[in-house]
Image: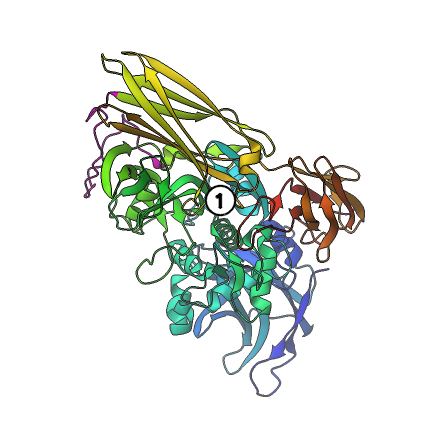
Amino acid sequence: MDRLQQTTRNTGGRHLGRCQLKLVDFEVHENHALHETRGLSERHLVVRRGKPFKLTLLFRGRSWDPHSERLLLQVCLGSLTEMIPVQTYDKRLNPHKWSAQVYTGPSGQTAHPESVTVHICSPVLSSVAAYNLLVHIGTRRRRRSYAAGSFVLLCNPWLKDDPVYMPSDGQIEEYVKSDYGLVFMGTNQNVHQRPWSFGQYEPGVLEACLKLLEVSPQHLSDKNRDYTHRADPVYISRVICAMVNCNDDLGILLGKWQGSYEDGVRPTEWSGSADILRRWVSNNFSPVRYGQCWVFASVLCTVMRVLGIPSRVVTVFNAAHDGNASLTIEEFYSSTGEKLNISKDSIWNFHVWVECWMQRPDLGARFDGWQVVDPTPQEKSAGIYCCGPCPVAAVQQRCLSAPFDTSFLFASVNAEVIRFIVRNRLVVGRTVDTKCVGQLIYTKNIGSDTPEDLTLNYKRQKTQRVSPIELEPFSASSPGEDLPGLEVSLNINGKPSVGESVGVCVTVTNRSSRPRVLEEHVNAQVKDYNSSPQESFWTLHQEVHIQPHGALTLQHTLPSSEYESALAADNIVSLAVVIKDVQTQERVLETQEFNITSPQITIEIEGGDSIRAKKEQTARVSFTNTLTKALNGAVLTVEGSGLLSGRHQAQLDHLKPGEKIEKTVSIKATSPGTKVLMASLGHVSLPVGRHFLFSRVFGVFQFVPVVPPS
């Protein structure tokens, strides 16, 4: 049933005849269907700006007489208010200003003799917010006023005049309505994915997103100014971006990238945004502990989709953090290939941000479309921890002065890498890599779980002309400068999996006309995706000979026994080879970083992958130890927001190689939308303070579309 809201008299005075307002029916079901807002809230009418919605006024005693009584609606946003005369003649509602008219239906008659149905249209550039609605009935002498209730107004990507208009229904389905997404992680050599439940249809999520706007510094300092600017998606995205992290406001998430997570939740344990948003609200806007880049980005994507701004999560592989705005990244290696942690610059194996779709009237039509918005707190922008919105087109066209933060984001995907070989504090070799950074940029494809490659959206092709408004020069080393007599390449054979040896192929080419005696140094270090490598765990040194204009292919094997006890949480290995000419002391460096695929956790759902709301089903979760050693204190954990209450665990003190651990749980979907059932395996680490394989291992994530009950 539609929810009716009892009106209350807002002003005093004598009885004004017999026309009194009894009820206001917000026609929630019909309005939500017409405005594509079904499921967003059970507490509020939720509509989109620039599109008419209807409500029915039910009177007591007699109906409203349009000949003797004036009907006015009043919408209030804080102290901002707008009076809307209700017109009785049939006229197309104006989407550029508040307007209202009586709707009589095809037959010219109202549905009830003592009721009036009114169509209301908001301006297409209305502010995104919760509005209060008042109804006034008056004559020339007196007026009676009623507080009718409230409604929420969102952006309208279906409406051509809205700055977030998106012409394709398929895109809107994916980037606004879909509550399920994928985050791509790992390395560009071995990409893996984890599902994420954006959860915009979960109870309380819409209200949390509105509260996020209300506790922002902009709103707390000047409510009316904030309300006025909320018509602009550029402004909204910048406010929300800063509020997703808590570094300088009452934001949602506290970031943490190392150390203990015992006083919060390890970032890898989150599977959706709804739990995070609800925790933030229930804890009186205290920050939720803890997030990392994909958590920040996924929560931002949820909020933007709820507010009606098309958004998608994007992963940049080999994302540069240019600490000194030089558009170059410096790395240092020892003469035997060990990477040294002495640079202020860094390259993350992957970094996750969000693209939001909107027009940029402040920059011109050429910069409309996808905008980068990055909520991970790395650098301040205009004094606050936010980044963007930055047009993807500005990054591609190298318009580094375009707001916001284009220069920083350009370096993230286009910086060149200068690698120095250092011996006894002296530089004895130098290479320039113009291809490493931003090597691969992925997002989820529309309607499928395959990746869409966005790399060329950020990188100018050779045939493209330079933008005439480009102000900042960008220099890169010429490919032909200082061509060495030696060339080296480094490749990993296939995609390594835990428990298997890793094949390493080094190819050396002699461009000179003389034979050479060479020293080969191969070095392996473990690392987390966002930090410098730890100390070396595997090295190889040998002497080799190469003929004039010859080539050598050197095959090496990294045994699983060498890396199993050394791997960090992300299973990433930093590998480098230095080839040295014994006679000339010439040194050539090549590097490669790769991740080793974890063993899979298997999840099977009784009755297939589609479940029905409110119906109990069984999920069987299992893991087989494929390592060459036993796992001590192995704990299999299963959890899923909207499917399970709390965590369900199975423990085995000593999981031998080849042995299996299994857990059966009963699941039931308690709300509509896509669900994520998550399984993880932990075990007791050996040395204190070190991260080891399977300290938190995530295998298969089972996502299940919930079918409404018949």
Q: Is residue 69 left or right of residue 246?
A: right
Res. 87 in view:
no
Q: Residue at x 74, y 48 (%)?
A: 652
Q: Quadrant of the N terminus?
A: bottom right
Q: Is residue 625 above or below residue 379?
A: above
Query: Which SS class for mark 1?
Result: strand
Q: Residue at x 53, y 82 (%)?
A: 142
Q: Is residue 539 left or right of residue 694?
A: left
Q: Is residue 273 magenta?
A: no
- Residue 589 versus residue 147: which sits nearer the camera? 589
Residue 470 on image: x %, y %: 21, 41
Residue 148 on image: x %, y %: 59, 71
Magenta stretch: helix, strand or loop mostly: loop
Q: Is residue 87 above or below residue 553?
A: below
- Number of numbered discs visible in the structure rendering: 1
Q: Is residue 694 above or below residue 647?
A: above
Which residue, given by chain and number where applicable, does mark 1 sit on? 312
Q: Is residue 393 above or below residue 110?
A: above
Residue 674 on image: x %, y %: 65, 46
Mark 1 packing: few (<14 Cα in 10 Å), some, or many (20+)?
many
Q: Is residue 525 left or right of residue 10?
A: left
Q: Residue at x 56, y 60 (%)?
A: 277
- Residue 593 versus residue 555: which sits nearer the camera? 555
Choose top left, top right, bottom left or bottom right for residue 334: top left
Residue type, numbered disc 1:
Arg
Q: Residue at x 34, y 14 (%)?
A: 551
Q: Quadrant of the C terminus?
A: top right
- Residue 18 versus residue 492: which sits nearer the camera? 492
Choose top left, top right, bottom left or bottom right for residue 516: top left
The segment highlighted magenta reads 458-485
